[in-house]
Image (cartoon, grey):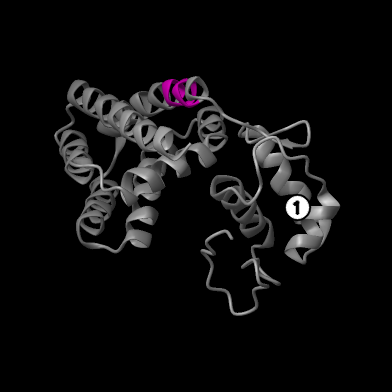
Amino acid sequence: MSEILYNNKRNNKWGVPMENSKNEKTYETLRDMIFNGDLKKGEKITETNLANTLGISRTPVREAIRRLEQEKLIDNNRIANPTERDYQDIFEMRILIEKFAVAKATQFFSPSDIEELENYVEIGYSGELEAKMDVNKSFHEKIVNGTKNKMMIEYFNQMQSIIYLFRKTVLSYKRPGLIDEHKEIVTAIKERDTERAEKLIVEHLKADLEFGLYYLRDDE
């Protein structure tokens, strides 16, 4: 069964909270059920069946399905089967967004913004896996959100499930140099070296893609 990631005191057996943040937690639970194989590729789903399985109402399930459809994990009420080409296409778009974003960061990030990134790097070196997952997410979101470009941020958010899959893969299998690369990116931002920051983040994301694909192929 899916690994439950939540610590709410009033969770049901699937870990879905009975109170706050139900939409987000339902989305995360269904996402993990897809990636862990509890929902099989090609399997037909309905709001009613999923709501009954999770022991919740249909409303958060409907919202979760909508988001997962945007992220190409559900298609026509069936669990989608992303191909390697799909992953590559998503990362090509991600690289375009984050390259633009890191260039903006070199121009406009304040000392406090940079200090926040440095703190994420420190936790990346010393934290447990769950903490590393959180700060990895925060590191990249901080850079992208810094663009203040609503359209770009929306596209980035629509990739979140695939980004999560690769983040979990590269951290679980301990990709060499990952946190060092974050540190170098922060240094380039701090030194206002736009060209170097762009180069570093492109190389970083390409390395994530290559490493992640290697293990995802092995898991198929």
Residue 213 against residue 30 in the figure, above or below: above
Mark 1: few/some/many CA within 10 Å (<14, 14-19, 20+): many
**Residue 145 located left or right of residue 70:** left
| Label tally | 1
Inspect the magenta stretch and tell me whether residue 192 lies in it.
no
Quarter of the image containing the N terminus? bottom right
**Residue 127 sits above or below residue 215 on the image:** below
Residue at coordinates 78% horizontally, 40% vertically from top-left? 44
* Magenta segment: 87-93
- Residue 128: which quarter of the image? bottom left
Foreground residue among 35 and 122? 35
Q: Residue at x 19, y 42 (%)?
A: 176
Q: Is residue 119 above or below residue 40?
A: below
Q: Residue at x 16, y 43 (%)?
A: 180
- Which residue bears the numbered disc 1? 61
Where residue 52 appears, x then y in whole percent? 81, 61
Q: Nearer the viewer, residue 84 or 163?
A: 84
The prevailing secondary structure element of the residues shown in magenta is helix
Taking the spot 49% from the left edge, 30% from the top edge, the residue there is: 149
Q: Which secondary structure, mark 1?
A: helix
Q: Quadrant of residue 57?
A: bottom right
Give left or right: position of 30 versus 206.
Answer: right
User: Horizontal and vertical percent for residue 58?
Assistant: 82, 56
Amino acid at circle 1: Val
Taking the image as shown, residue 145 lies to the left or right of residue 189, namely: right
**In this rendering, is residue 99 above or below 12?**
above
Query: Residue 29: percent from the left, percent from the top?
Result: 61, 56
User: Is 49 situated left or right of 200 in this image?
Assistant: right
**Which residue is farthest right?**
48
Q: Indicate the position of residue 109 as horizontal and vertical percent values.
A: 29, 39
